[in-house]
Image: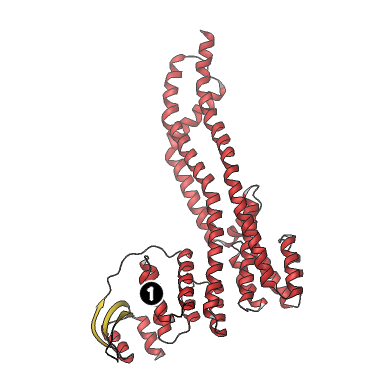
């Protein structure tokens, strides 16, 4: 049977919608991924279903599957399982009710695997792009302990909190980034279209121009002559830099260190990393995953290679008998509050509870910092833009002021 399943996997598969009647004569319908109608009929016969109608499902284009989609799916699955809905039926309900066609296809693939006898965690592991080791390990722990619905509920809460932190960090960075882009476009328009008009007027004066005016006009001439090169270099440079950041490990490590040392945003990123690190470890502990095994998933979940490298060292020290608190202290990156709460958790046997409290505190700190940054960045950006645009305007009006003094 395993060979047959593998063979069908290798063939080009399509989703078929079917209708029919079960052994009791009750009308039933559903969907199945298969390589042909004959395979659908054979599978339905094994289930005791007499098919009356089988047709290919019309495929719709779908949006990219985002972590937020996986978090919503996990919450829906946990809610339905807690309500007593069978696993396969829960997948059916969630898949049909999802607006993203790609999510529906993904859930149908997982449902088909589970239906053929594969464990849920093994089915998730076939899609590492959407379900990381942390997710699969927690699901596997829930299946082994018979508390899958509780683990899915914890996992959904963890993912929701993690996505909330990511969203807050992005919103904090989005505002200044958007303003910088708009400011560059405005300055480019002034340099390419406005300054040349002033230059023609000043040329007719026949007088010596002030140094600031000459400087701005020189920049304008460069923009007019090489605007395609400027936009090409900036756009191409940003694209290749972002790709290198994503794909090159050395660039990623360098940028992760730089981000933590930024004057304003560094503290925000650091607190978010601590919040995600402690939240992940607390969730793994609560699921009953052993400490050394839990640390495998914690470093990557922090979202920063500095914390990832520190987690590897902590794991090595813990595996040789060092306490978690001592290993975290040796890493020299965790705040004293986290170290103290971890020490209390180790002494009282409630590490998951204390780490959860630490995560709550730092998530609250991230919220407060994002709110504070929003109000702090506005006057800073106004001053910078005012100085930039005002400097250009004053430079271009200086010759006019000089002419007025001469007259």
Which residue is depicted at the point 50% across and 57% down?
A: 243
Q: In the drawing, does residue 6 fall left or right of residue 343? A: left
**Nearer to the camera, 253 or 223:** 253
To which quarter of the image does residue 367 belong? bottom right
Helix, strand or loop for disc 1: helix
Which residue is depicted at the point 24% across and 78% down?
A: 55
**Nearer to the camera, 23 or 110:** 23
Q: Quadrant of the N terminus?
A: bottom left
To which quarter of the image does residue 194 belong? top left
Where residue 88 sits: x, y (%)?
A: 41, 81
Q: In the drawing, does residue 48 fall left or right of residue 274? A: left
Where residue 128 sits: x, y (%)?
A: 49, 73
| Other-residue count near label 1 (Cα within 10 Å), few / some / many at <14 / 14–19 / ≥20 | some
Q: Is residue 98 above or below residue 217?
A: below
Where residue 77 sits: x, y (%)?
A: 46, 74
**Nearer to the camera, 354 or 47:** 354
Does residue 219 appear in this view? yes
Q: In this view, does 251 lie above or below 25?
A: above
The residue at which mark 1 appears reads as 93
Which residue is depicted at the point 49% across and 53% down?
A: 240
């Amino acid at each position: 049977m395993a060979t047959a399943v593998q063979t069908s996997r290798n063939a080009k598969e399509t989703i078929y919608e079917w209708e029919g009647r079960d052994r009791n004569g009750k009308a039933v319908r559903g969907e199945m991924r298969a390589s042909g109608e004959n395979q659908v009929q054979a599978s339905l016969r094994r289930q005791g279903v007499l098919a009356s109608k089988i047709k290919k499902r019309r495929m719709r284009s779908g949006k990219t599957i985002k972590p937020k989609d996986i978090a919503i799916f996990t919450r829906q699955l946990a809610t339905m399982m807690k309500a007593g809905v069978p696993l396969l039926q829960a997948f059916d309900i969630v898949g049909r009710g999802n607006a993203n066609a790609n999510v529906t296809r993904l859930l149908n693939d997982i449902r088909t695997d589970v239906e053929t006898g594969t464990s849920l965690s093994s089915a998730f592991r076939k899609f590492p792009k959407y379900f990381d080791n942390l997710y699969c390990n927690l699901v596997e722990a829930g299946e082994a302990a018979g508390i899958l619905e509780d683990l899915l509920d914890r996992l959904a809460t963890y993912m929701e909190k993690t996505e909330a932190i990511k969203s807050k960090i992005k919103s904090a960075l989005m505002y200044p980034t958007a303003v910088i882009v708009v400011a560059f476009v405005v300055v480019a328009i002034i340099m390419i279209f406005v300054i040349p008009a002033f230059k023609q007027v000043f040329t007719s004066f026949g007088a010596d121009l002030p140094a600031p005016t000459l400087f701005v006009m020189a920049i304008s001439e460069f923009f007019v002559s090489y605007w395609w090169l400027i936009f090409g270099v900036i756009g191409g440079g940003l694209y290749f830099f972002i790709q290198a950041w994503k794909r090159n490990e050395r660039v990623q490590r360098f940028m992760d260190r730089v981000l933590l040392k930024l004057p304003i945003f560094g503290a925000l990123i650091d607190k978010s990393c601590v919040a995600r690190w402690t939240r992940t470890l607390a969730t793994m502990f609560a699921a009953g995953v052993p400490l050394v095994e839990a640390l495998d998933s914690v470093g990557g979940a922090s979202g920063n290679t500095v914390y990832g490298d520190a987690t590897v060292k902590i794991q090595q020290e813990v595996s040789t008998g060092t306490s978690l608190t001592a290993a975290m202290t040796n890493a020299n990156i965790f705040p004293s509050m986290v170290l103290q709460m971890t020490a209390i958790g180790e002494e009282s046997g409630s590490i998951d509870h204390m780490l959860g409290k630490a995560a709550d505190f730092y998530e609250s700190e991230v919220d407060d910092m994002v709110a504070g940054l929003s109000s702090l960045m506005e006057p800073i950006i106004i001053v910078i833009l005012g100085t930039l645009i005002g400097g250009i305007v004053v430079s271009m009006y200086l010759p006019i002021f000089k002419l007025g003094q001469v007259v």
